[in-house]
Image (cartoon, coloured by chain):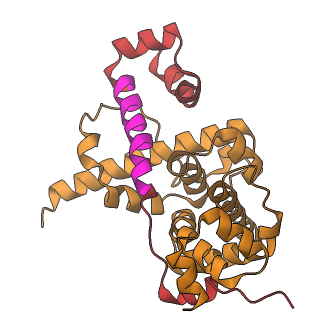
Chain colours: A red, B orange
Amino acid sequence: MNCTEFQEILPEVFEAGRTAEQAAHLKSCPRCSGLLADLDLIAREARQLQELAEPSPRCERCCSRPSPIP
Amino acid sequence: MTDAKKLQGDKLSEADAIERAKQGDAEAFQLLYNLHKRRVYSLCLRMTANTAEAEDLTQEAFLQLFRKIATFRGESAFSTWLHRMAVNVVLMQLRKKSLPVVPLDETLESEEEAPKKELGAQDPVLASSIDRLRLQRAVDALPPGYRRIFVLHDVEGYEHNEIAAMVGCSIGNSKSQLHKARMKLRESLKTSRAEKATKPW
C-alpha cells in the first residue's frame, strides 16, 4: 500500500478501524501516520467547541414567551 | 408569591415543566427555555457562523417546540428531542436559502474549497496550533457544506447514518465531506500558525 492508496481510504479508517495492511503502512510512513494523528486530534478537539454561547437579550424576549398560534 | 417564584422555589423538575408546558403553562415553558437556550443557540451559531441568523433560528426552534411539545412522548431524552428539532430547523432554513447542504457531486467543488492532497512533509506540531478560538475561527471559515457535516459529527456527536437521514445525503457522502472538512481545517490551522510565526505582533 502506498500513501495515495492509504489517503484515499482514510475516511473509512476513522470509521471502521485499520486493516493489517493499513497498520503496516502507518508503521512505516511518518507522513501518513502524522496526517492521521492530526486529523484525529482535530476530531477530538472539536468537542471543546461544544462550549455554550449565550443568546442576546433580544433573543430571550422573543423566545421565552411564544405567542399562541391564532 | 407569584407562580414563577413558587415554581422555582419548589425546584420544579424538568419532567414536571414539560408536562405543565404541554398544558400551556407559560412559566413552565420559560423554565424549559432557560434550561436549553444556550445549547440550542450554540448549535445554531456553530452551524451558521452568524449570530443574527443563529438568533433567528433559535427563536424558530423554540416556536417549533411550543407548537410540538404536546407530541413529546418521552421515548428519548427531552434535550435530545429538542436538539434534533433545532438541527432540522437549521437544515430547513439552509435549504430554503438554496444553499447546497452537501455538494451533490464532489468533483464540482471549486479548487479554492477543496482541501489539498496530502503528500507533503509531516508537520509534527499541529497540536500547538489548536486552541479553541483558533479552531472555532477555522470552522467558521469552512465552506458551508463541510462545516455542517463537521459540526453535526465531530462537535455535536451525530453518527453518519443520522446525518445522512437529516441532511438527505448518503452515508458515504457524509464520511467524505467530514474527511474533507478535517483536511481543510488542518490546512487552515497550519497556515494560521505559519502566519503567526512571521508576524509575532
Task: Give the quarter of the image for residue B4.
Answer: bottom right
* As drawn, B163 above or below A57: above
Q: Is residue B36 found left or right of B198 in the rendered image?
A: right
Quarter of the image that includes the N terminus of chain B: bottom right
Quarter of the image that includes the C terminus of chain B: bottom left
Location of residue B186 in the rendering, given as x and y in whole percent from the top left corner: 39, 45
Q: Point out the residue furthest to the left here.
A: B201
Q: Number of labelled discs?
A: 0
Q: Nearer the viewer, residue B118 or A45?
A: A45
Location of residue A14 in the rendering, given as x and y in whole percent from the top left corner: 52, 29
Q: Is residue A33 found left or right of B196 in the rendered image?
A: right
Q: Is residue A39 magenta?
A: yes
| Residue at screen point 43% across, 49% down | A46
| Residue at screen point 29% across, 56% down | B192
Q: Is residue B33 magenta?
A: no
| Residue at screen point 44% across, 70% down | A53
> Please, what is the dominant secondary structure of the magenta stretch?
helix
Location of residue B54 in the rendering, given as x and y in whole percent from the top left corner: 57, 74
| Residue at screen point 74% across, 89% down | A67
Q: Tell me where the magenta segment starts and ends, as one range.
A: A32-49
Task: Give the quarter of the image for residue B74.
Answer: bottom right
Confirm whether residue B117 shows in the render: yes
* As drawn, A55 above or below B103: below
Q: Which of B119 and B55 is in front in this view?
A: B55
